[in-house]
Image (cartoon, rainbow, N blue to C red):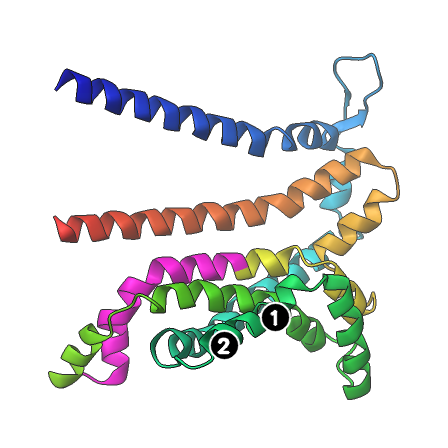
Amino acid sequence: MNIIRYSSLKQRSGYAGVFLLLLAVFILPFVPLLIWSFSLQWRFPELLPVFSLRAWSYVFSSHSQVWTSILNSLGLAAATSVISQLVAYPAARALGLYIQRGNRWIRLALIAPILIPGIAIAVGVHVFFLQIGLSDSWLGVLLAHLIPAAPYSIYLLYGFYAGYDSGYEKQLRLLGATRWQSFVQAELPLLKPVLTLSILFSFLNSWSQYLFTLFIGGGSLITLPMLLFSTLSSGDYSLMGALSMVFVIPALLVVIYSARETQVDQFAEKGEAA
């Protein structure tokens, strides 16, 4: 018994060490950015910078484009997340449950937008959208963001449906449930953790998109990545630090919320199993 406890404690210590290492690797790059955002100047060999709120005053000022870019980025990321799931759900369900012949080739074709360099796709899509009148428009940028986001969602949901037992739904349908009732009561609770991850990846994919927004938006649609990249060439480290924090915090909140929801679902499943 003591050997088992010792082994368990050793395993937990190992996990805790790996977790702390990953946490440090994740957080450390943001520390200098956070310090720079509250600095006026920070020159070698000074250990501490000259404190200033200049960068944050500019970020929250009415004449900066930060608020507009945040709204554009949030709107695009939210729309991309929702539409990606609407596209991915029937595709993943069909691939996982019904399509057997050519399944591997279809999945290979779906992953092509992820394998091909983004700039090659962006140039081709830009030419096509110019011909059909979707270039330099919000809708065009949204459709372009779906190109890399939708395959991620399809693959994530396909992994779920490849091992999904549709017998639960059939039992409910035999008892008189409608298709919607069987989806809500049998399919959705099992699908929810994977669906949460799929929404998270779609959101982050769109949130960090720069190439597609630049090519398809033509500079008329300003998002946070575009504003951040344009600031990088200015050499203003304080403003770069503040904008980087504004760029990271919403994405970090979405990741924390998604992780929490997934964890709650896992605990609920364990509770039901017990």
Residue at 49% in and 48% down: 255
Q: How many marks?
A: 2
How far is disc 2 from disc 1 in space, using C-alphas? 10 Å
Looking at the picture, tell me which residue is in the foreground, 217 or 131.
Answer: 131
Look at the picture and state if 255 lies above or below 221.
Answer: above
Query: Counting other residues with Cα less than 10 Å from the Cα at mark 1, is it few (<14), some (14-19), or many (20 or more)?
Result: many
Callout 1 secondary element:
helix
- Residue identified by numbered label 1: 146
Look at the picture and state if 101 lies above or below 64.
Answer: below
Is residue 188 in the magenta section? yes
**Apparent side of residue 44 relative to residue 79 in the rendered image (left or right):** right
Whichever of labels 2 and 1 marks the residue nearer the N terminus, that label is 2
- Residue identified by numbered label 2: 87
Looking at the picture, tell me which residue is in the foreground, 27 or 68.
Answer: 27
Is residue 222 in the magenta section? no
Q: Which residues are magenta?
A: 176-201
**Residue 209's image quarter?**
bottom right
Q: Amino acid at mark 2?
A: Val
**Apparent side of residue 15 relative to residue 27 in the rendered image (left or right):** left
Q: Position of residue 61 (x, y in %)?
A: 75, 47
Q: Position of residue 257 (x, y in %)?
A: 43, 49
Q: Position of residue 157 (x, y in %)?
A: 42, 66
Looking at the picture, tell me which residue is in the foreground, 200 or 119.
Answer: 119
Q: Position of residue 97 (x, y in %)?
A: 34, 76
The image's mark for residue 160 is: none
Callout 2 secondary element:
helix
Look at the picture and state if 20 lies above or below 55.
Answer: above
Residue at 73% in and 65% down: 212
Looking at the picture, tell me which residue is in the foreground, 178 or 191.
Answer: 191
Marks 2,1: beta carbons within 8 A: yes
Q: Amino acid at mark 1?
A: Leu
